[in-house]
Amino acid sequence: MLRPEQMSKVSVTGSRAVMDDVIETVHELNLVHLSDYDGSWSGFEPGNPIEGAEAASEKLVTVRSLESILDVDDEDAGPSRIVTDDALEDELESVREEVNELDDRRSELENDLRDVEERIDSITPYADLGIDLDLLSGYQTLQVAVGEGDAEEIRATLDDDSAIRAYEVFGEGGTVAVFAYPEDEADADALDEALVGVDFARLDVPDAEGSPEEYVEELEHERQKLESKLDGVEQEIEDLKLDAAGFLLAAEEKLSIDVQKAEAPLNFATTENAFVAEGWIPTERYTELASALGDAVGDHVEVDELERASYDAHEAHGPEEPDVKDVEADGGERTDGSRASSDLASDGGTTMDDDQPPVVQDNPGAVKPFELLVETINRPKYFEFDPTVVLFLTFPLFFGFMIGDLGYGLLYMAIGYWMYESFDNPAINSLGGIALWAGGFTALFGVLYGEFFGLHVLGEIVWAGHPPMEKGLQPVGEDFALTWMVVSILLGLVHMTVGYVFGFIEEVGHDPVEAVLESGSWVLLFAGVWTWIFSKPVGQKPEFIFEIFAGHPFEFGFAGFSPAVGNLGLAVAAIGLVLYIAGEVKHLGRPGVLIGALESLSVLSDALSYTRIAAVLLAKAGMAFVVNLLFFGVYAIDHGHGEEWHFMTSYGPEYVQSHYEGASIMFPGLMHSGIGGILGGILVLVLGHLLVLALGITSAGLQAIRLEYVEFFGKFYEGGGKEYEPFGYDRQYTTQD
């Protein structure tokens, strides 16, 4: 789980006469992650695509274009089928012609409809005027302007304009028509000049006659006819989609496979009579590859395991005692002077390029969904520890601990199950799996806290009184709040130490000194500083860190380490600091005392960062408490060691004041304030808990994943691994010919 599947670099060397059969066999296995040939071998050139590659690519573009026009998706596939070359020639051309004809008709109707709508938009303002369109233009001495503006402002402006002898303004709001008779000596655009200082947006008068209302009606009738025709074409397209979708999806799959196979030689090193192909496969499947190729082409190929990739990033990659053999071309000795890839390996120029092994994460089914969280940052390198299993163990724990409510947990699980079962999308399925685990831990901690949607009913039902844990929101249980802060820090120390141990293990095999100076020094710093912090009575420290596990609230018998242990912790921390400073000096080539001293403070800040777990726990508990307080109401009773709060779920404030001496009402509750209060309170209750549910994801979820990414990953993880993409195709719509 902590390491990916082991990968082997393999070489397939053979005669050009069997290259097509080798490609077919390897593609069917869907196993080999091909390496690109970089052209560095003397006498070898990159291969050329197999004949027909260009034609297949063009058909593939055509098929995808038709799918786009018809809006085809996976749900339209139907049963899998065999797609022959003849069908690709005949049926594809028939579908293409029909689709293009319908698409052209649709485009033409859409353009006509757009034109009619633009004309309707342009004529509608004139319908408000009630003036025939032919009366708005065609005058020799009378000037006309139609537009949008304030009629009163226009009148006032024209009254003051000496160039206008007489005028008339029609329309009071929105669209107005202005008819003006200018003075004899006035310019031909006197009306336009008069309206320059007015807020007036001029409209072009359409070239039409008669009543604008009638014209609009004609246009709307024309629009209805066009929409009807367009609906008919859309229905024809939908019918064609139902008929052709299965064929198109199958054709796309077949052509994609054909193109893959045809372009495979581009990755090969070739001569006139031979070829060499290299790639990565899971080590345990090497025999499967060799057997399949042997069955397909016999002795005409040689399959070599060039390298069994080590998990040490610093180990040189090369062949493991390769066999030096010539592969016969056409059953005889080679005549072109070429050599098998294993011969090349023996020269030291082993592989086609210096590519790193692709990564196949090796996690069991329950852990698989959490690979999404890792890949969100980056896929782990082949040589790194895969942190997925740690996320599986810690992320739901952090999340559930912060929310800790049976009701919310069940809802998170229901949402996760719905996402997992209802979508055909790996990412959403993974999110659903994560939600299931996070919800499960939320429900588990909810039982331990005795909470159900913020109500403490489980304490009485499950625990016959007080639950074993409280969130520490109430004054009577404030010791729990302090406890969770310390527990959060302890979780952080364990979490980060695992990260440093991972980093130490990755380095120690390559350079033990480097491992000690880097990860080892941090482990000593952490252990030493926090041992001293938890020792008593060394230094001035908060008393609660020695009380919470010695009786308040847990009786674990731990009241702090002895002073001698604390002094030993300081000595260990000093050793760690010295080692860290030595590492700074070694790496940077400059005095590292000041840098090391400053950065060593992160042993405190990084651990204290985990107190956000306790902070979110109290914040979410507080939000749920407020929602329930508004609906049910709450009364408080002081028992002498802090107030204890109780929800009024079955009785009101009057009952409390008459039966509980010394009780004070914090809030009477909407449910106890009449029918209006009940109805409003139900709305507050439902929306409030939905808000808490949503904020649980954005606060607890984001804070938990932040601790994983920043505090944990930062100790050892880089990422940047190559995805395993085997040469092959997972068929969905086609069957073998």
Image (tube, rainbow, N blue to C red):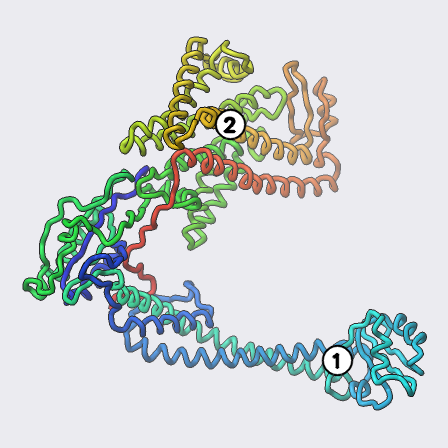
Q: Residue at (13%, 53%) from the top-left corner? A: 343
Q: Can residue 491 be seen by looking at this rendering?
A: no
285 over 548 or under it: above or below: below
Tell me the SS state at disc 1: loop
Q: Amino acid at mark 1?
A: Asp
Q: Residue furthest front?
A: 590
Q: Which quadrant would residue 513 be assigned to in this image?
A: top left
Residue 342 located left or right of residue 438: left
Residue 492 image point, x, y percent: 46, 28
609 over 729 or under it: above or below: above
Q: Residue at (80%, 89%) from the top-left corner? A: 138
Tell me the SS state at disc 2: helix
Q: Can residue 116 be seen by looking at this rendering?
A: yes
Q: How dense is the environment of label 2, judged by Cα within 10 Å: few (below 14), some, or many (20 and up)?
A: few
Residue 82 image point, x, y percent: 29, 70
Q: Residue at (22%, 59%) from the top-left corner? A: 26
Q: Earlier in the sequence, mark 1 or mark 2?
A: 1
Q: Which residue is mark 2?
A: 605
Residue 638 located left or right of residue 252: right
Q: Residue at (50%, 41%) from the top-left corner? A: 412
Q: Which residue is mark 1?
A: 204
